[in-house]
Amino acid sequence: MTVLALAWSAFAFAQETFPSRPMRLIVSFPPGGGADLTARTVAQKMGELLGQPVVVENRPGANGLVGCDTVAKSAPDGYTILETDRGALGINPSLYRKIPYDPLSDFEYLGIVTTAPYVLVSDPRLAVKTLAELVQLARSKPGALNYGSYGVASMAQLNIEALKAKLAIDLTHVPYKGAGPAVQAVVAGEAAATIASPAGVLGFIRDGRLRALAIGAKSRSPLLPDVPTLTEAGGDDDTLVPTYFAFALPARTPAPVVTRLSEAMKSAVKSPEVAERLDKAGLEPTGGTGVELLELVKRDIPRFRAIIQNVGIQPE
């Protein structure tokens, strides 16, 4: 009993003193953009709350595979944290024949940090001002209208394919190398529509070079208060699903460490200065739980697999 008591005391002391050195936050995407902004904004506040720096390290590559693999193989001690997105967790299992991590068993999830809804935007030179009018035009000219995506099997393609099926319309897919080029294609008139983050298209909407038809969120964006939600516009808010940026730890990280970091993450997201900065970037502070995130990943994998199979995308 004495040996067990001493062992437990040592364990408890180790948890009470966590963290005793700086932590790494591995971001599975390059600098710039919503993922990086989320990581750096929240990491700074978490470091203040925990009393140790949280150092952001970008590890981009292969739709998030590189960063996820790095953390999955790290020591489960709480000193290596992952930030990744919906695609890396929910889409990659169907996009690749083999991935180096299992989203359902290789991580201890802290929760969703921010949610990034998508705005459906169209070329203002088209004779459409609403989603209903876009549907009417598309049905009158099946396949004649193009839509731009961020690449094959990107959230843009899979979301718009789901929207096409829901609304019974035919749009032709044109992949571009990222969200910026896809948006520019609509501005230039090369594509009729695309989806993008509110912050990514706000300037174009305000100067009339893009028209916002709907936003895929449960409520309107403070950046675009006049743009209806997809449900208000006649669609379904579960069709144009947002992406998210979430934090995770390697599997088998001790529960007290998971709890400590999860609480720090949620406190950071709720702080006024962090929430304000995220809101201005079109990112919705979330601060969800690890259990909620795991359940969402479980639902997402078959959901996106069905879309990928219906579109005919072959796993790499």
Image (cartoon, helix red, strand yellow):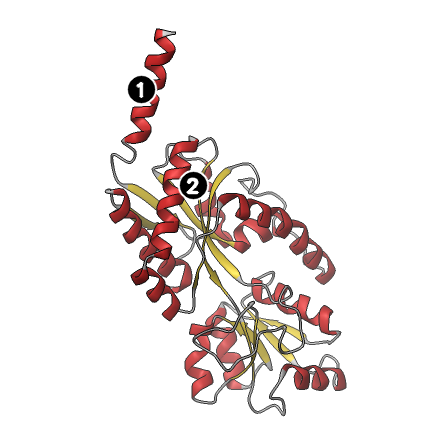
- Left or right: 5 as drawn, with respect to 84: left
Q: Nearer the viewer, residue 164 or 115?
A: 115
Q: Quadrant of residue 77?
A: top left
Label of residue 106 in the image: none
Q: Nearer the viewer, residue 96 or 71?
A: 71
Q: CA distance from mark 1 to mark 2?
A: 29 Å
- Left or right: 166 as drawn, with respect to 148: right
x and y, in percent, of residue 250 in the image: 45, 36
- Considering only vertical position in the picture, is 42 above or below 19? below
Residue at 53% of width from left, 51% of height from top? 88
Q: Nearer the viewer, residue 60 or 84?
A: 84
- Considering only vertical position in the picture, is 224 above or below 314? below
- Left or right: 76 as drawn, with respect to 178: left
The amino acid pointed to by label 2 is Thr
The reply to whether the C-beta atoms of the residues labelled 1 and 2 are less than 8 Å apart is no
x and y, in percent, of residue 245 in the image: 46, 55
Q: How many marks?
A: 2
Please name which of the two marks, 1 or 2, marks the residue nearer to the observer: 1
Among the two numbered marks 1 and 2 on one chain, the one whose residue lies closer to the N terminus: 1
- Pointer 1 local density, CA inside 10 Å: few below 14, some 14–19, many at least 20: few
x and y, in percent, of residue 148 in the image: 58, 74
- Considering only vertical position in the picture, is 127 above or below 295? below
Residue at 42% of width from left, 45% of height from top? 82
Residue at 60% of width from left, 60% of height from top? 153
The amino acid pointed to by label 1 is Ala
Secondary structure at badge 1 equals helix
Answer whether residue 24 is visible to the viewer in this image. Answer: yes
Which residue matches tag 1?
Answer: 10
Which residue matches tag 2?
Answer: 70
